[in-house]
Image (tube, rainbow, N blue to C red):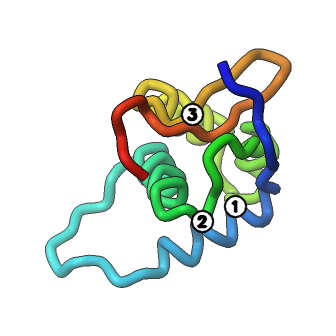
Amino acid sequence: MAQWTSAVGAAQLARQLKAQHDRPAGPNSRRPPAYRALAEGIRLLVLEGRVPVAARLPAERELAVALSVSRTTVAAAYEALRAEGFLESRRGAGSWTAVPAGSPL
């Protein structure tokens, strides 16, 4: 398990996610659940290089406050990212971004 090399603050991540969310969507696009939209937003920021790989993400509570969502929403998004291989976590040490093995940036 790699150690994180930089950190992304909650306010900074919230601004990046809001800018990404403000992009126009397709005419018949359906809105995914909030946790899925958050996970997709973070994954896209990592894949685009706007959030570096091995960057420590804010704690669930801190990000929930910055985004004005429940902690459960952030926890579910982080869990989805862990399942996809885009996030690694260790209790007490935090969570940091990753890229699944075999996935090009």
First in residue order: circle 2 vs circle 1: 1
Amino acid of disc 1: Leu
Badge 2 crowding class, 10 Å Cα cut-off, few under 14, some 14 to 19, many 20 or more, is few
Question: Which residue shows up at 36% across the image and 40% down it?
Answer: 103
Closest to the camera, between mark 2 and mark 1, is 2
Closest to the camera, between mark 1 and mark 3, is 3
Give the x, y percent position of residue 45.
Answer: 53, 60
- For the N terminus, the image quarter is top right
Front one among 47 and 14? 47
Front one among 47 and 58? 47
Which residue matches tag 2?
50
First in residue order: circle 1 vs circle 3: 1
User: Which element type, helix, strand or loop, lies under badge 3?
Assistant: strand
Amino acid of disc 2: Arg
Amino acid of disc 3: Leu
Q: Are marks 3 and 2 in contact (CB under 8 Å)?
A: no
Badge 1 crowding class, 10 Å Cα cut-off, few under 14, some 14 to 19, many 20 or more, is many
Residue 87: mark? 3
